[in-house]
Image: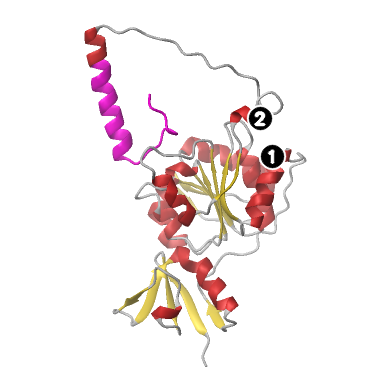
Amino acid sequence: MNPVRVRFEDGTLVVDGLPIEALPDGFQHDPRIGLPRGPACAYHPLVTLLHRRKLAYDDVARRYATLGRPHASSRAPRPYQAQAIAAWRRSGRRGTVVLPTGAGKSFVAELAIADADRSALVVAPTLALVGQWYDGLKRAFGGTIGVVGGGAFDVQDLTVTTYDSAWMHMARFGDRFGLIVFDEVHHLPAASFARAAEHAIAPFRLGLTATLERDDGAHERLDSLVGPVVHRMEITELAGEFLAEYTTEHLTVWLSEEERASWDEHRARFRAFVDGNGLSLGGANG
């Protein structure tokens, strides 16, 4: 019996040697080639299935490699960061970590990259954050760091990109990474951005955010795109010991009828933009 053959093609997987009914969910018969085709993100369940059934297979989909770069940081992880990585590892190196701003989510990502030891891609919302990630990864792992976005297209074993560039180009290089880190992962469920997860074979995935829940409820998609929430801590749990103490103050501002009408008009326009682009304000109502 010939081995099953798995290949990556334009953000999808093509399987030769197994019928549709033997494959994980998401595969459909492609009449153009006479073979089953499914989303690239089905790579992990597909390979798991092949292993469990002890089926020989020829994997020509995977182009990622062992990273082989030691983590150069001398910092010891804080207890909650170590707990986050341990929980992520127990979950098969898939899942989301929710920590407040300032709690060191990027250091958690560095720990995950070192732990997975696979070619890794970091996806960030803005070019400014891409620059910050670039600097941090350079300090932590040395060597060449790739950048995709802002006019650059340099794909390396350790690369950082924007959500916009990730969804547009993942069909081209979605076979290059074994780990994807989604910074501010609450952006990912937006219709276009989700392709960044769907078109990648990466079996290891880490989501990071301080504001998981979206007003449209789309954060529930993250379980399938990245994995479940594996560790969560709120600011109240870290304030005083790891984060500065804080107080919350509410100020009331009285508006005239004209000011209120102007406020309502501009707020409605703002909400239409936010909702129309699948953005999240972390559940804020203001």
Q: Nearer the viewer, residue 12 or 132?
A: 12
Q: At 63% across and 60% down in the image, what residue appears?
A: 118
Q: Nearer the viewer, residue 127 or 221?
A: 221
Q: Main secondary structure of the magenta part?
A: helix
Q: Residue at x 48, y 76 (%)?
A: 6
Q: Where residue 144 sits: x, y (%)?
A: 62, 51
**What is the x, y in percent for residue 74?**
77, 41
Residue 270 belongs to magenta span: yes
Q: Is residue 271 above or below residue 47?
A: above
Q: Quadrant of residue 239?
A: top right
Residue receiving disc 1: 80
- Is residue 142 in view from this perspective? no
Q: Residues within 10 Å of mark 1 (few under 14, many from 20)?
A: some
Q: Earlier in the sequence, mark 1 or mark 2?
A: 1
Which residue is pictured at 68% across the width and 52% down the height?
A: 114
**Where does the C terminus fall, quadrant-wise?**
top left
The amino acid marked with disc number 1 is: Tyr
Any magenta on residue 242?
Answer: no
Mark 1 in CB contact with mark 2 (< 8 angstroms)? yes
Looking at numbered disc 2 in the image, what kind of residue is underneath it?
A: Leu
Q: Position of residue 42 (x, y in %)?
A: 47, 66
Q: Nearer the viewer, residue 91 or 161?
A: 91
Disc 2: which residue: 238
Secondary structure of residue under mark 1: helix
Any part of residue 229 in sight? yes
Residues in magenta? 262-286
Q: Residue at x 43, y 45 (%)?
A: 219
Left or right of 143 in this view: 187:
left
Q: Is residue 10 above or below residue 74?
A: below
Checking the image for residue 175, the label placed there is: none
